[in-house]
Structure formats: C-alpha cells, structure tokens
Image: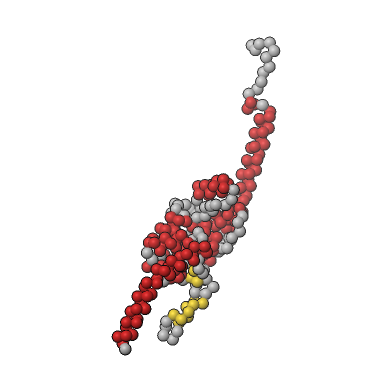
Amino acid sequence: MPPPGYRFRRPWYARPQFCVLAAIVALLIGGFAIYLSILASHLKSQAATFDLGKLEQMESASVILDRNDKIFGQIYVENRETVPYDQLPRDLVNAVVAVEDSKFYQHNGYDLSGITRAALKNFAAGHVRQGASTITQQLARNSFSLKEKTFHRKLLEIFLARRIEESFGKQKIMELYLNRIYFGGGLYGAEAAARGYFSKSAREMSLSECATLAGLIKSPNRLSRRVSRSAQLRARPHARSRFHRQCQMRQLAS
C-alpha cells in the first residue's frame, strides 16, 4: 500500500500529452508517406511519356567534299561525329567513370548514397557544391533538355534515368553519353572533341588525352581554352618538322 499522501503518476508514455503528440506525429508521417507515394506515381507516369528513341537522334555535322572527294568543309548546328562503342577507347570510358560516376556499373540509374552525401555537403556549405548526377542522369538531362534547377526536375531526372537503365545496357548508355556530351569549344561527342583538340580520332587517343577529355565534362566552357592552347603548343614542333620536310622536297625537286 502506498504511504498516506502519495499521488500516483502515470509513466510518461501513458500520459495524455504524450499520446496526443504521438498521434500528431503519426498523422504527419502517414500524410507525408501518402504524398511521396502520389508524387512517385506522378513522376513515374511523367517519365513514361518521354520517347527514348530520341536518345539516338543526335545532330551530326554534314561533310562537304570537293570533286576529288576530299573534305572541303562542314555544316552543322552541333559539331558532332557519332561513333559506336567499340571505337571509343577503353581508357576514355574508364576515365569518365572515375571522374563522373564511380558506381556506374553498380547502380540502376541513380546513386542514393551519393545523393544523400551531396545533400549533406550542400546543406553544410549553404549552397550547391555537388550535384550527385550519375552518367545516366546526365544523359537524360542532356537528351531531353531538363535544365531547370528545381526539386521536381531532379526527381523526374532520377525516374527517367531508371527507365533508361531498364531499356538499355551499360555499354549502350556509355556510347550514347560519350556521343552526346559537350566538351567545350563547340565540340559535341568524344570523336569531334578528339579531332578538335588533338587532331586524331577518338580510338587513337593516349591515356593522358583520354583523361583530359574526361576532365572537361564538369566545366567545358572554362577548361576548353586551356586544353586547346596546350594542344596547339604540342602540335607546333610537328608542324615545323612537316614544314621543313616539305621545303627539302621542293629543293630536291627543283
């Protein structure tokens, strides 16, 4: 028996205040879950409206030949020359994966841990420092002009990337990505970039040249001038040697 004057107190979890608070929290969580379910259904339906056939519809340069079948010039809106996956150097593929999306071969279109990590870093910095977009998300964004910096656009990009992963293999996704991505200097795709910066086809690039192109993707407009200047300096000795050889041949001919 309790002593005289003792007042029985319920445990904290049985008090009315706690029960009311728990009910409110449960309602909020339930409402948020219903909202997420409706939003996910809407985004999935919206992602299904995109024509994935447009992923392979890329603007390419039209080549003008002279009467001797030599290249006279090009006409283009986007300077691009598409090539199949087997003509893309393995070093370039590895470099792009290392720089842009280290979990490319493991995820199904988006990297949830990467998104969470980027969100925490952006929150700590007070501004956007990381985007956490996978290669597939970048392909979706560039193919369908999803450029708005909104929460809805980011979620739509994730659902569309998931649909792309369900429709294409990793090699095909990489082929579409490297043929579409912008490398600065008005050059679209790895083949046009290799010819524009290094005067060679993509499959002839060295490891350092592949790494250089991979590094351009994050900021092509800012870095392309530096790469162009470096390529020009490397090309000068070769150009001078070719010029001297031509002069020697002309002297011998005369």
Residue 62, relative to residue 11: is it above or below?
below
Residue 8: x, y in percent? 67, 18
* The N terminus - image quarter: top right
Expressed as whole percent of the image width and height from the top left, the position of residue 212 reads 43, 62
Residue 211 in picture, x, y percent from top left? 42, 60
Determine the residue positioned at 52% across, 57% down. 137
In this view of the protein, which residue sits in the foreground, 21 or 69? 69
Colouring of the image: secondary structure
Q: Is residue 1 left or right of residue 240?
A: right
One can see residue 79 in this view: yes
Quarter location, residue 21 = top right
Q: Up-down: is 129 above or below 81?
A: above
Taking depth in this image into account, of 1 and 122 the one nearest to the observer is: 122
**At 50% from the left edge and 47% from the top edge, which residue is drawn?**
113
Residue at x 44% of width, y 86% of height: 67
Task: Give coordinates of residue 164: x percent, y percent.
Answer: 51, 59
Identity of the residue furthest to the bottom in this view = 254
Q: Please name the residue shown 58% across and 46% down the image.
A: 123
